[in-house]
Image (cartoon, helix red, strand yellow):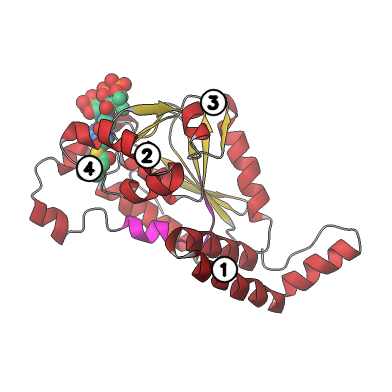
Amino acid sequence: TEYETILAETRGRVGWVTLNRPKALNALNTTVMREIVDVTTRWDADDRIGAIVVTGSERAFAAGADIKEMEEKSGLEMLMTDHFGGWARFAALRTPVIAAVSGYALGGGCELAMMCDIILAADTAVFGQPEVNLGVIPGMGATQRLVRAVGPYKAAELILSGRNMGADEAERAGLVSRVVPASDLLAEATALSDQIASKSLPSLYAAKAALDAAQETSLAEGLRFERQAFAALFDTVDQKEGMRAFREKRSAEFQNR
Ligand code: HXC
């Protein structure tokens, strides 16, 4: 399928989405949302895909939701069209998703990164929620996900001031898992996504679901979920193979990958 605003390709067991609106610094309009949701939900249903990478350009991961598209809309329109609603489907993918961020990840761009499971950052990455500068507030999840990522006080400072932060500050705050030189970002994302995609899919789905439960439920609920999911994996051939391979001192040949 050809897309207008993204490049989509599979490399081995990994699906790669590259945002491709360079003139708008990859601003996220409704077409970008529709196209990302379309390709990633198809990959999610394909057991030949074990990880997804979302990336942008060197200059911008994404500079936010598309301000020019939203500017003239009424509140009623935003509500009735559920302007950002498609993103809930992206956030609900079962496949692990890595955001590889170089340059601006502002507003909806930062929020898109936070819908991914892992954020890898180039040393040039800039994160922020500048919506207050536009007279609005974050609308794709930051008031909730940034609080969980960096804590309520740091999130409040960022969202209320609209200031940006660099990659090192984002790493110290726990938003990004790793900062790498910009020239290494795609190689690092390739290595990490290939490593993830080499595991047994049922275990990846279970791990992601349990990690999501940690964000969404109480500790007791989350622990209950983990115990059930852990037990269920003992009915997979890959659990038998993984443990037998350990005993036989060789690497596992998973079937569900
Ligand atoms: C639409 C955008 C855009 C955006 C950049 N562009 N960001 N278009 N929506 N979010 C466009 C510019 O209009 C310009 O097009 C081109 O991209 C290049 O941008 P410049 O501003 O010329 O580049 P530069 O001077 O390098 O500045 C980069 C920047 C700045 C600091 C990232 O573009 C910027 O501040 N962008 C907006 C960031 C922002 O506020 N994001 C939050 C959006 S609201 P033209 O054609 O004019 O040359 C959001 C939350 C949604 O995401 C939920 C609440 C509604």
Nearer-N-terminus badge (2/3)? 2
**Can the viewer see residue 65 in this picture?**
no
Nearer-N-terminus badge (3/4)? 4
Residue matched to label 4: 137
Span colored in magenta: 86-98
Q: Is residue 86 above or below residue 8?
A: below
Label 4 lies in ligand 1 vicinity (Cβ under 8 Å)? yes
Q: Along the horizontal axis of the image, is 176 left or right of 111?
A: right
Magenta run includes residue 25: no
Q: Three-letter amino acid code at disc 2?
A: Tyr
Cα distance between the residues tagged 1 and 2? 27 Å
Cα distance between the residues tagged 4 and 2? 17 Å
Q: Three-letter amino acid code at disc 1?
A: Leu
Label 4 sits on a secondary structure element that is: loop
Residue matched to label 1: 223
Q: Quadrant of residue 108?
A: top left
Residue matched to label 2: 153
Q: Which residue does the image show at 55% across and 71% down from the upper left?
A: 225
Indicate the position of residue 51 as horizontal and vertical percent values.
57, 54
Residue mark closest to the camera, 4 vs 2: 2
Residue mark closest to the camera, 3 vs 4: 4
Indicate the position of residue 86 as horizontal and vertical percent values.
31, 58
Nearer-N-terminus badge (1/3)? 3
Label 1 sits on a secondary structure element that is: helix
Label 2 sits on a secondary structure element that is: helix
